[in-house]
Image (tube, helix red, strand yellow):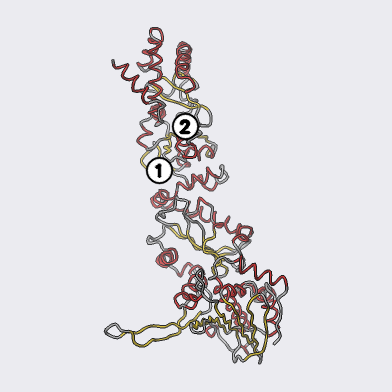
């Protein structure tokens, strides 16, 4: 028997594939089942135009036989089989794609759904087998041939006895090691699990012999019963017509496939044709996974190629801000033999991802419009991710996400969208006003909030740390810019009030200069306030860094040694009795005025929720004033 050699490039490809392309050895079974399905596909479609085939769809099957004594695993099909020349071409040269050629040349190729490429995938068998034997008989031929190889050293082809057309692949499994238990692939539970995981939706039955132990009345084992069992479901849920399915069907599939005890908030079942052809079945969870906002959470959709899973979690199909979505995508446009690195460059994957993004956005928008209560519950679980999505992309995703945002506001107890806020804006109102704080109650007590509400303007309440950062990146909504109630140029005064304030400021210019000097570089200036009604003092900020942003950034562990500072101004209420007291002290006791200034500054810090610089100094000043 002549020993034939693989070509040099084939040897290199085989070594690379075994060692690099597939990180999970278990996918060998997926590859071999897919090849068997391809072989059946070819004969099935031949039968549609050739009555000599004499087989109906129900006659085709794939059979898996595990022999624990011989340590062999056999995958057998009754498909079209291979001639000696085809064995040579398909198995002697790695990456020779018999199925691809069939799909290209066959007039029925559009419908044949060939899912594998008999070549690269076949050689995954050598990850688990020390010897691979392929026995095949082509349909219509009287001869059968056997291909045998132990790997890169070469192969042999010889005639053999095989009564029926089709192919059987016999794997002599490697010996177990401390690191790898190859014998596990002979376990019927393991075989069924792998078929369920990767090949459950192959459209021909995958069968195997299963054993059932019987017991007597006392619980002692008696006879062993064997039966042939079909272990794949064959018809994917996502391939069925939506009219056939009910919510219970989707919910059961979701629970079984993704292990979530709670029914999903919504499901999306879609078929797309065009530049990218695919089916997708997506689910929006109703509860937040325990690790969702941690670095341990792994996003991604299951990725199938014509019903065969090629990746359990494809991250590239979902943007981070939609990472909560669970589900799968099935496309005939993707090769079964594709690595994670290749997927990242695959144009089809990128097109599918972009289309899915729009689909998810539309579903959420529909929920927001038609099922507000359900959307608000969803948003309480996952809405924070939208804000991060705007901030982390520097606003690149603003158009996708801006209309999905919800905020508490001074308008009422319910959350509001930006569109709803703008629809309620007063005539002539230029800005969308907002205030930041740890809670709604804290924000409502801010001195600066009093005047905004008194003027009749609605305020958005930002209670998440990322809120203001996201809004700064968003810049505006439909032409309306955002303004914090602590901005230095709040500009809510009437012309008369502005004139009075200007005169009062001019009269007190020297006093404010003294107070600024007393505080040193803690503030940029001390000035008369145009935003206070009943409170004596507040802080405002100039520039892009607000008071709340300073607080958030300085609370981060990585910024412990490099604290940032907002450009602060201490504002004094000119109509408060404290203002008269300050003017009196400026004329009579500047030392006491300096103490008052520091006391007011620390008071303003506490109001804003900012840590005071020197608690001991503050305590001593209070005691001095009390004596």
Which quadrant is the C terminus positioned in?
top left
Q: Which residue is mark 1?
A: 415
In the rendered structure, which disc, 2 or 1, sits on the residue that comes first in sequence? 1
72 or 99: nearer the viewer: 72
Residue 246 percent location from the top left of the image: 42, 67
Label 2 secondary element = strand
**Taking the image as drawn, is residue 111 in sight?**
no
Q: Quadrant of residue 136?
A: bottom right
Report crowding for label 2: few under 14, some 14 to 19, many 20 or more residues within 10 A (C-alpha): many
255 or 603: nearer the viewer: 603
The residue drawn where x is 39% and y is 55% is 287
Report crowding for label 1: few under 14, some 14 to 19, many 20 or more residues within 10 A (C-alpha): some
Label 1 secondary element = strand
Name the side, left or right, on which 581 lies relative to 482.
left
Q: Quadrant of residue 42?
A: bottom right
Name the side, left or right, on which 276 lies relative to 69.
right
Circles 2 and 1, Cβ within 8 Å, touching? The answer is no
- Disc number at residue 491? none
Residue 413 percent location from the top left of the image: 36, 41
Which quadrant is the N terminus positioned in?
bottom right
Name the side, left or right, on which 310 lies relative to 266.
right
Farthest residue to the left: give it.
218
Q: Quadrant of residue 44?
A: bottom right
Q: Which residue is mark 2?
A: 484
How many marks overall? 2
Residue 614 percent location from the top left of the image: 40, 25
Residue 429 percent location from the top left of the image: 48, 31
């Amino acid at each position: 028997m002549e020993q034939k050699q693989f070509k040099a490039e084939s040897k290199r490809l085989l070594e690379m594939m075994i060692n690099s392309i597939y990180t999970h050895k278990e996918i060998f079974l997926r590859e071999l089942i897919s090849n068997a399905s391809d072989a059946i596909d070819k004969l099935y479609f031949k039968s549609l135009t050739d009555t000599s085939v004499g087989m109906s769809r129900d006659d085709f099957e794939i059979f898996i036989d595990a022999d624990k004594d011989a340590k062999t695993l056999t995958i057998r099909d009754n498909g079209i089989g291979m001639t000696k020349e085809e064995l040579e071409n398909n198995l002697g040269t790695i990456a020779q794609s018999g199925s691809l050629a069939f799909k290209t040349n066959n007039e029925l190729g559009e419908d044949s759904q060939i899912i594998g490429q008999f070549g690269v995938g076949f050689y995954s068998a050598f990850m688990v087998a020390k010897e691979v034997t392929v026995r095949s008989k082509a349909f219509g031929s009287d001869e059968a041939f056997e291909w045998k190889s132990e790997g890169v050293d070469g192969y042999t082809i010889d005639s053999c006895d095989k009564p029926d057309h089709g192919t059987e692949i016999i794997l002599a499994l490697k010996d177990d090691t401390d690191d790898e238990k190859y014998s596990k692939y002979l376990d019927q539970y393991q075989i069924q699990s792998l078929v369920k995981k990767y090949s459950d939706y192959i459209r021909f039955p995958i069968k195997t012999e299963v054993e059932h132990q019987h017991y007597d009345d006392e619980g002692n084992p008696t006879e062993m019963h064997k039966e042939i069992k079909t272990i794949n479901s064959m018809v994917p849920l996502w391939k069925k017509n939506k009219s056939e399915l009910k919510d219970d069907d989707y919910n059961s599939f979701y629970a079984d496939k993704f292990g979530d005890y709670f029914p999903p908030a919504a499901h999306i079942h879609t078929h797309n044709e065009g530049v990218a052809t695919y089916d997708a079945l997506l689910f929006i969870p109703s509860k937040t996974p325990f690790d969702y906002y941690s670095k341990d959470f792994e996003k991604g959709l299951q990725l199938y190629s014509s019903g065969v899973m090629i990746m359990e979690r494809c991250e590239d199909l979902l943007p981070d801000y939609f990472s909560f979505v669970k589900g799968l995508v099935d496309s005939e446009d993707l090769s079964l033999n594709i690595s994670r690195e290749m997927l990242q460059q695959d144009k089809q994957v990128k097109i599918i991802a972009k289309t899915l993004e729009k689909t998810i956005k539309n579903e959420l928008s529909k929920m927001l419009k038609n099922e507000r209560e359900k959307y608000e519950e969803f948003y309480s679980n996952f809405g924070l991710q939208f804000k991060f999505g705007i901030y982390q992309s520097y606003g690149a995703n603003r158009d996708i996400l801006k209309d999905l945002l919800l905020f508490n506001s001074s308008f009422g107890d319910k959350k509001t969208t930006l569109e709803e806020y703008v629809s309620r804006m007063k005539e002539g109102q230029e800005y969308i006003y907002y205030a930041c704080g740890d809670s709604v109650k804290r924000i409502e007590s801010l001195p600066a909030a009093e005047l905004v509400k008194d003027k009749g303007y609605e305020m958005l309440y930002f209670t998440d740390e990322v809120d203001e950062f996201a809004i700064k990146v968003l810049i505006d909504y439909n032409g309306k810019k955002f303004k914090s109630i602590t901005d230095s140029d709040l500009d809510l005064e009437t012309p008369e009030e502005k004139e009075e304030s200007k005169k009062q400021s001019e009269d007190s210019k020297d006093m404010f200069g003294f107070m600024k000097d007393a505080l040193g570089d803690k503030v940029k200036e001390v000035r008369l306030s145009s935003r206070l009604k009943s409170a004596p003092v507040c802080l405002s900020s100039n520039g892009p860094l607000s008071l709340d942003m300073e607080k958030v950034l300085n609370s981060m562990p990585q910024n412990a040694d490099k604290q940032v500072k907002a450009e602060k101004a201490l504002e004094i209420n000119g109509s408060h009795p404290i203002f008269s007291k300050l003017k009196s002290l400026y004329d009579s006791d500047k030392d006491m005025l300096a103490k008052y200034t520091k006391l007011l500054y620390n008071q303003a810090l506490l109001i804003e929720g900012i840590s005071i610089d020197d608690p001991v100094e503050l305590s001593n000043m209070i005691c001095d004033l009390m004596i």
